[in-house]
Image (spheres, helix red, strand yellow):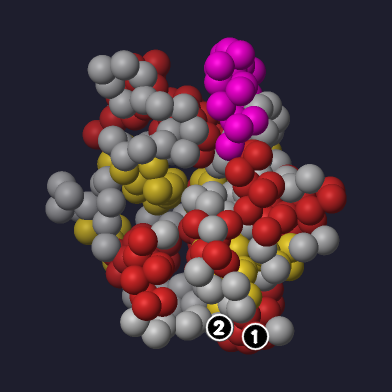
Amino acid sequence: MEAAQALAQRGFTPDVIFGHLGWGETQILDAVWPQARSLVHAEFFTRPSGLDVGFAPEFPSLDPVGFARVRSKTASLAMTLLNADTGRSPTHFQRSTFPAELQAKIEVIHDEVDVAAARQRADAIFTLPNGVVLGAGDEVVTHLNRNLEPLRGLHIFLRALPASLAARPKAQIVIVGDEKGTPYGMAHPKGTTWQAHFLKEIEGQCDLSRVHFLGKIERARYLDLLAISAAHVYLTYPFMLSWSLIEAMSVGCAIIASDIAPVREAIAHRQAGILFDVFDPAGLAGHVIEALANPGRVARLRGAARAHAVAHYDVRQCLPRMLFWWNV
């Protein structure tokens, strides 16, 4: 608030104030600039069970203190949206997480991807840390997220590796994501990380020399990796849809993903990708093996994924809608 008042004293008068719903700043800035339109990024409305919290049966539900903490957070989210002129959600699923009484205030406009940059390139290559160079035609299975954690399906992916690697002796598994970063979901187990925790489950069951954890990588390398992917696995709880999924679609990856509401909004099963029960590692392994063994069968899915991304998520389509929303 002090920073806003200092700006106002220097004559700064915004026409629009835009902020994330989760932090609450937009609730109070109209005290300094009452004439400005207040817009919020209505990204997600959590709840004590069934979405990002309390979804997977193998993990404990919230205790009463945790339940109260989540409820308190939602009170702030609701108040921020009520005090805003309008909100924006990237997907219909994300808007649907908000109480029905508030959804009318929210427009659905995706953040957009640059489909010209995220595209299939036959000449793309990717060099692993051990010096192995991968390219189109290699059996590369990709999995990536901001953080490696259960909310984004790390445990399911790793549990599928023994069967996948046994059936495909030439397959290379490439995993991108921060091992130690702050998870969206549950905190890391005490004294370890989710990556190390779940790797212990499959220790001795597969050739981990073919499993490559890269941590964070530069964007250019990330796009190269997607371009050479033979099977791209995207897993999530009912949560915010990752930009990486849309970019993988734009590149034309053969996508195998959780059969879950936010994913179904972007991918129809057997049309633009393959969907499976998020809690079924054996099912995931079967789909990965099938995609690697029969690349011709997934070629149609690759083209459909690219076409859907271009039609619905291209920056050239989404940006004009975003600018109109800002200026209405």
Q: How crowded is the residue under tag 1: few (<14 C-alpha within 10 Å), some, or many (20+)?
A: few
User: Mark 1 = which residue?
Assistant: 327
Q: Mark 1: which secondary structure?
A: helix
From mark 2 to mark 1, how far is it between C-alphas? 9 Å
- Above or below for 215 versus 286: below
- Residue at image coords 47%, 83%: 13
Residue furthest toward the front? 9
Please tell me the numbered disc located at residue 71.
none
- Residue at image coords 72%, 55%: 82
Question: In front here: 235 or 98?
Answer: 98
User: Mark 2 = which residue?
Assistant: 15
Residue 64 in the image, given as x and y percentages of width and height: 61, 14
- Above or below for 180 versus 193: below
Q: For the residue marked with disc 2, what is the amino acid?
A: Asp
Q: Magenta stretch? A: 53-73
- Residue at image coords 39%, 42%: 147
Residue 36 in the magenta stretch? The answer is: no
**Quadrant of the drawing holding the C terminus:** bottom right
